[in-house]
Image: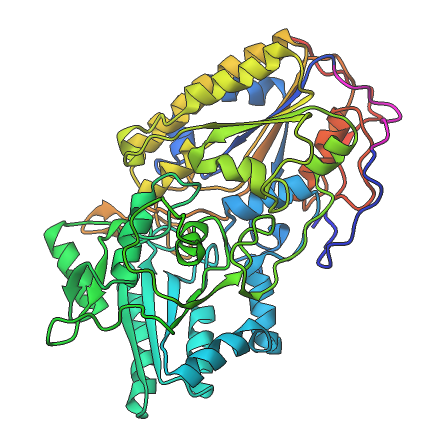
Amino acid sequence: MGGLNMEDGTDPGPLRLRGHATLPAPGGPVVLLILDGVGTGAGDEFDAVNLARTPNLDRLRRAGLVASLRAHGTAVGLPSDADIGNSEVGHNIMGAGRVFDQGAKCVDRAIDTGRVWDGYWKTLTGRVGSGGGALHLMGLLSDGNVHSHEAHLHALIRRADHDGLGRLYVHALLDGRDVPDRTSLLYLERLEALLGGIRDQGGRDYRIASGGGRMVVTMDRYEADWSMVARGWNAHVHGEAAGFPSAAAAVEHFRAQESGISDQVLPAFTVRNPDGSPVAAIEDGDAVIFFNFRGDRAMEMSRAFTAGAGFDRFDRGRVPDVSFAGMMLYDGDLGIPEHYLVAPPEIRSTLGEYLAASGVPQFACAETQKFGHVTYFWNGNRSGKFDDALEEYVEIPSDKVPFEQRPWMRSAETADAVNRAITEGRHRFIRANFAGGDMVGHTGNMEATVIALEAIDAAIGRVLAAVEAARGCLVVTADHGNSEDMVERDKGGAPLYEDGKPVFRTAHSINPVRFVIRDFSGRSYELAPPPDAGLANLASTLLELLGFSAPAAFAPSLLRVESTRRVSLT
């Protein structure tokens, strides 16, 4: 895979970098632009990247050095090559410089070996069982394997039954984003079959209690919109949301109200008993497990459950005294949550940490929707900076409207921040994320996604001019695909249609991403990527472009420096 598996978190070596033997540092900064969700597609009518007018990207690809990188599956530490890439693992791997097992694979192994039942699971279920409380399982009902997997939820349910827990309730967040849209009834049907089978044996009350679409209920991230968490809290904890006899009835009702509504924006709902009472509010003495393994969209609800009286993000009302756990540790620095079922991989000695230890000033920026990706995930799931004096992080507030309504998002403001950092001349390494290709691509709105990509291209043109003026080096790549494949396809790759209309895709893809270098420093090298080059190869490449030798444990660089080919200045 062009990388080294570092499952045990082994330190790749001393953190002080050595200068490169033959490639000097550029006169200006090395600037990395991550075009979130912009992969390499088929070039057809459903490839928004192909449809968009992108003169600056086109110029970069003609004049620069270009390669293709794998950004999904085993290349980024996911269980199989059928697994789509995502922003979390993409930034983890780019910043870490090597491949390691990601959350899904860690949970799979813990369940397969039975280790998951030996830790806090035993403590939590013991308390509930002895006290007569209920176990609540909350998270994304999906097999997208990006934030969660239904197999993990099903395993928890079966184990709870095995361990004799009498009451279990699921608070199901519906996907339509990491899986084909409008498929929520399939996942609900499988879940209901499992719960119903256990109920039929007698002595168990196992049911779905509440839910809603992931982009409007519970799963906010980076504090972009706490009202999503408040809606989830009221539905899950208090049982206060529109009531229905079943989760499937809720979905069907909302679809009847709004034709074509996406699963990801279905309103909050509760499942109610015949007398109108909620199936299960969350009460004192209960236990709650957030079964998402990925942390960014589980952090805020975890805080709502575990924070003390000083919590002020929304009015929680009655706060139940519960035992709370995450599927994994979501933030190691902040210790959120305190308890979890599966230990995450320890990611040390990342690119950012090496640069900080070597005295290299760094700048990182993105709008809110992706700010944590160029900081927390890039730094190996670390919240803080490695060196406050050497690092500057800039968050540009995202608009709080549906992404298709302002598809340009904050591309212009992100370019402003990057160009300020370039002209100041203090930072040797600058990284930024442009969110539009992913966030707007997720809406399935082709016209809006094209606009998003054209806004990004305009921003790239401005950054390109600033890098050239500073005699620096520009690197452009992506963390995974999305906007280049906006339609669902059959196994042969042909677009799918329903009632004569294309079935637009809202999920990520397994397509590769482009990697482009445009160097204005006059140095000599060429690209020579291995056949299986992936995102893990980025860190070593950036270090060489900065004038350093890469650590031996990092995946190899994409550069061949011995070449006499000269990088054009024009």
Q: In x, y percent, where is residue 188?
A: 29, 68
| Residue drawn at the location 60% of the way across and 47% of the way down | 381
Residue 295 seen:
yes
Main structural element of the magenta stretch: helix, strand or loop?
loop
Residue lying at the far front of the rendered structure: 309
Bounds of the magenta segment: 17-26
Q: How is the image coloured?
A: rainbow
Q: How many marks?
A: 0
Image quadrant in which the C terminus is located: top right
Considering only vertical position in the picture, is 300 above or below 28?
A: below
Depth order, front residue of 225/61: 225
Residue 528 seen:
no
In magenta stretch: residue 23: yes
| Residue drawn at the location 38% of the way across and 67% of the way down | 321
In magenta stretch: residue 116: no
Q: In x, y percent, where is residue 24?
A: 82, 19
| Residue drawn at the location 34% of the way across and 81% of the way down | 167
Q: In x, y percent, where is residue 171?
A: 32, 65
Judged left or right of residue 198, residue 513 is right
